[in-house]
Structures are given as structure tokens and as C-alpha cells.
């Protein structure tokens, strides 16, 4: 898939008219100018320009209707809904029922993925299950600028094993003056320090820069060096195609409220490769990992369901499962992650082209921005991160955007992230956002 070099000079209306996914926008609720606190001069009931799906995806009508359905069943049937459900979503195995829809999004078999718990809790669960440091092999290889929760998790994992995080955690930073980590540098560290590394865990898409790592290559190198390789897919799932099974990834975790549109605090997800099925059992058992046929008989001994499903601990919320299900159904009817990714490459390429044509991009004196996300569409997902200078400009720009009904988000002290999402954003949204950005910067 190529991004045409003159994409930014094409008319957004024409690009939208040619977009095979254009009708999916109507499947979502778009926050209005009035509701997001835009200027009173804008029509309050018109949709704002929402470019923040990297942080919180939007509510679909399908998710709303499925959640309402669960509330109705709960209200009308109570506990009976566990086994007798008017819509065939018996709560006793509701989580498992999502796996066939989730599997193609991360490139796994159904039995390798399960919707459960939340991201950070699942990260600890996987570290507990797979991080068994020895005197020789005890290090965790990760990014220095990983999402704080991941850094806290790795740090505390080292301490929990009686290790000093200073020596047990190798946290890689980009080279001086660069924003993205170079793949060759990661492979280099794995080659040099491999025998001492127990776990390699990067994020599939970096939350701050939007960089997409070559998960296949890094996994291959890590496995070759004898390490356990896990991935945090928070910003990758629902954003870019992933092939966890074929790449031989050991485990992965994700949240679903970003590109999977399940709502704030929505249910998390877990992948455990089937190669582990006959080697290890879930170490931290709970009743929801028990074989389906006897889960509610509560036998004395724990017999886990084979695969990732056996890692479940608790009864998952039917409301958060229902909202995720609505979103997964939309992905399926849109033609899957390959279809959304094809549009995403164009949409983000269009955003990049317009931004690069701006007189405030890189070359200008005074207030300006640089795009710190890699320019290669295969090294990024939907998001572009803009680094503003001089210091203090970013907040003014963010306020100006919001005032004009353009919603991105900030990462202190100087970055704004903009993420056009293929299921509900248009080329016209992108054009409008860049026009507003330029207007705001001209007025500084
Ligand atoms: C969003 C995000 C989280 C959030 O973790 P929760 O446990 O869902 O609150 C963690 N890690 C990364 C990389 C993220 O992007």
C-alpha cells in the first residue's frame, strides 16, 4: 500500500466520497462542540472534530444497544442470565464468546486470546507467569519512555524478585537528538545481552511517539536469544494488523478502550501462545479459568481450560464485554483490521502531508512544530505526535484547537497527539484540523 505523493493536494470531499468505510461514521456517537467545551460561536449541537481515538475511542450505537440489552437481561432475569439468556450471550461463557472475533484482530487462534481484567493487572499476571529470573538470566528489556504504568510494573517486578531495578531493568532510550528507538539498536542489545535477558517487553505502538515497532523482527531476535518475548499492545490493537501466533510471541496484553472503542476502563485482553499449552499451567488460578463444564460445580481441584482461557481469574463484567462485543462486530462488518488499516494509512498520510506543507512545520522561526512520529507508514499507526516549541506554545495551541472544536490530547510538556481513526474520522476532519491548527498558530 502506497501513499500517493500528492495526496495532500486532493480534495477531502473527493477522498471521502471514494472511501469504502465512509458509512461507518454513522455507527458512532460523535461528541458535539457544545459538549467538549468549544467556543460558543460554533454550533453547539454539531459534531466536534475528534482526533483522540488513541486515548479514548468513541461509543458505537452497536455497543450502546448491546450494553442496554445486558441491563435488560439483568433487570428481567437476574442470576438466571448466567445460563439462560434471551440473546444467546449466557454470562457463564460470555468472555469466551468474544474470542473468535478478537482473534483475527491480533492474529491468534481463539483459544489463545481472552477478554479479561485490565491491562496493567494482566501485565503483572503475565510477568508473574513468565518472569522467573535466575542468577544468569534475570533482566527485563524495555523502553525507558514506556507508558508509566509499564515502567512501574517492570520496576516493581524486579523488586518483588529481590533484584535491584537499576541492574535488572534495561530501559532503552532513543539516540541523542532522535525520538524513535532504532530497531537495529534494540536488536543489538538483544544480541549482546541476550543470555542475561529473561523478558523482552516493548509496546507494539509507542504511546508518546506513535512509533510502530517491527514486532516480528524483535520477537524473532528475542526468541533466538532464549528470552521470553511479551508485547504491550495498548496502542496497537485495533490500530495495526498483528500476527501474534505466527510471529511466535509468548504472551501479549492490551486494553480495549483506545482503538477498540469499548469505553473508559473497558475490559482488557490477554494472549498466550499455544506452544505453552503443554508446557505450563496457569500459575495464579481463579474459578473463571476452570473448565467450562464444571465451572459452576466448583470442584475441589483446579482443572484449567487449555490455552489463554485458563488464565482467567474472575467473573468478567457483562457490561464491559457487551460494549467490546459491539465494537468487534463493527470491525468485522468493516472487513477486519486489514480494511481499517488500509484507510488508516491514507488518512494519516493525508494528515502528515498537510502538516508538512504548513509553514509552521520544522522550518519556521518562532512558534513551530516537528512531527516526531516516523514518516514511514509501516513504522507508525494512526497517530502523529507533534512536538511544539518554544516551550509554552503547546498549551496555547491545544486550547486554541479545543476552542475551535478540534480534540487531540497533550503529553506534557510539549507534545500534542492527533489520531484520525479510520472507522469514524473523515478526510474532511483531517483537513479541518490542520486548517484550524494553522489559524491558531498564526494568531499566537
Ligand atoms: C493506555 C496504556 C496503559 C493503561 O493501563 P490500564 O491498566 O488499562 O489503566 C498501560 N500501558 C500502555 C502502554 C498504555 O498505552
Image (tube, grey):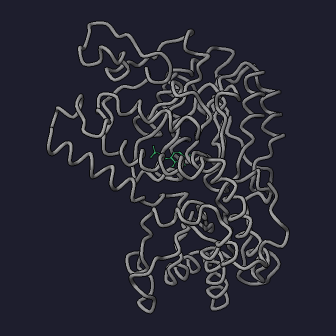
Image position, residue 216 (x, y; %): 74, 34
Residue at the top extreme of this rendering = 301
Q: Residue at x 74, y 65 (%)?
A: 349
Q: Is residue 404 left or right of residue 169?
A: left
In this rendering, the count of numbered labels is: 0
Q: Is residue 88 above or below residue 319?
A: above
The answer to whether 276 is drawn above or below residue 320 in the figure is above
Query: 142 above or below 431?
Result: above
Q: Position of residue 439 (x, y in %)?
A: 64, 88
Report the side of 320 relative to 336 (left or right): left
- Relative image position of residue 7 (x, y in whole percent): 79, 71
Of 356 and 7, the residue lying toward us: 7
Which residue shows up at 55% across the image and 14% down it? 277
Query: Which residue is at a point 41% across and 79% down the rendered structure image?
Result: 37
Give the position of the C terminus as an image quadrant. bottom right
The quarter of the picture where residue 276 lies is top right
Q: Quadrant of the N terminus?
A: bottom right
Quadrant of residue 5 in the image?
A: bottom right
Q: Position of residue 163 (x, y in %)?
A: 57, 24
In front here: 319 or 396? 319
Amino acid at each position: 500500500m502506497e501513499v500517493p505523493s500528492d495526496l495532500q493536494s486532493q480534495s477531502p470531499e473527493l477522498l471521502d466520497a471514494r472511501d469504502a468505510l465512509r458509512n461507518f461514521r454513522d455507527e458512532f456517537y460523535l461528541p458535539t462542540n457544545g459538549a467538549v467545551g468549544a467556543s460558543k460561536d460554533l454550533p453547539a449541537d454539531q459534531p466536534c472534530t475528534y482526533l483522540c481515538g488513541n486515548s479514548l475511542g468513541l461509543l458505537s450505537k452497536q455497543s450502546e444497544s448491546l450494553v442496554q440489552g445486558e441491563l435488560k437481561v439483568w433487570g428481567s432475569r437476574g442470576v438466571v442470565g448466567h445460563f439462560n439468556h434471551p440473546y444467546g450471550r449466557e454470562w457463564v461463557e460470555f468472555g469466551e464468546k468474544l474470542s473468535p472475533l478478537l482473534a483475527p484482530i491480533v492474529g491468534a487462534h481463539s483459544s489463545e486470546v481472552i477478554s479479561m481484567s485490565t491491562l496493567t493487572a494482566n501485565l503483572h499476571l503475565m510477568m508473574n507467569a513468565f518472569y522467573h529470573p535466575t542468577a544468569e538470566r534475570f533482566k527485563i528489556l524495555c523502553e525507558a519512555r514506556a507508558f508509566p504504568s509499564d515502567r512501574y510494573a517492570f520496576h516493581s517486578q524486579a523488586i518483588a524478585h529481590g533484584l535491584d531495578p537499576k541492574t535488572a531493568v534495561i530501559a532503552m532510550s532513543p539516540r541523542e537528538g532522535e525520538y524513535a528507538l532504532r530497531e537495529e539498536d534494540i536488536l543489538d542489545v538483544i544480541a549482546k545481552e541476550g543470555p542475561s535477558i529473561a523478558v523482552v517487553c516493548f509496546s507494539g505502538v509507542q504511546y508518546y511517539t506513535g512509533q510502530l515497532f517491527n514486532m516480528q523482527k524483535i520477537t524473532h531476535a528475542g526468541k533466538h536469544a532464549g528470552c521470553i518475548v511479551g508485547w504491550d499492545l495498548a496502542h496497537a490493537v485495533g490500530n495495526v494488523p498483528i500476527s501474534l501466533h505466527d510471529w511466535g510471541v509468548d504472551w501479549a496484553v492490551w486494553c480495549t478502550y483506545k482503538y477498540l472503542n469499548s469505553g473508559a476502563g473497558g475490559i482488557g485482553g490477554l494472549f498466550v501462545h499455544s506452544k505453552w499449552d503443554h508446557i505450563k499451567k496457569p500459575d495464579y488460578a481463579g474459578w473463571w479459568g476452570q473448565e467450562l463444564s464444571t465451572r459452576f460445580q466448583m470442584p475441589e481441584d483446579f482443572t484449567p481450560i487449555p490455552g489463554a482461557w485458563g488464565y482467567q481469574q474472575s467473573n468478567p463484567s457483562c457490561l464491559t464485554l457487551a460494549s467490546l462485543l459491539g465494537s468487534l462486530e463493527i470491525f468485522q462488518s468493516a472487513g477486519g483490521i486489514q480494511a481499517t488499516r488500509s484507510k488508516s494509512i491514507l488518512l494519516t498520510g493525508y494528515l502528515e502531508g498537510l502538516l508538512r506543507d504548513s509553514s509552521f512545520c520544522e522550518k519556521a522561526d518562532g512558534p513551530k512544530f516537528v512531527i516526531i512520529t516516523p514518516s514511514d507508514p509501516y513504522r507508525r499507526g494512526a497517530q502523529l505526535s507533534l512536538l511544539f516549541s518554544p516551550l509554552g506554545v503547546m498549551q496555547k495551541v491545544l486550547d486554541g484547537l479545543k476552542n475551535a472544536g478540534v480534540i487531540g490530547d497533550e503529553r506534557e510538556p510539549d507534545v500534542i497527539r492527533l489520531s484520525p481513526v479510520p472507522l469514524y474520522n473523515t478526510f474532511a476532519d483531517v483537513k479541518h484540523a490542520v486548517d484550524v491548527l494553522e489559524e491558531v498558530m498564526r494568531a499566537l
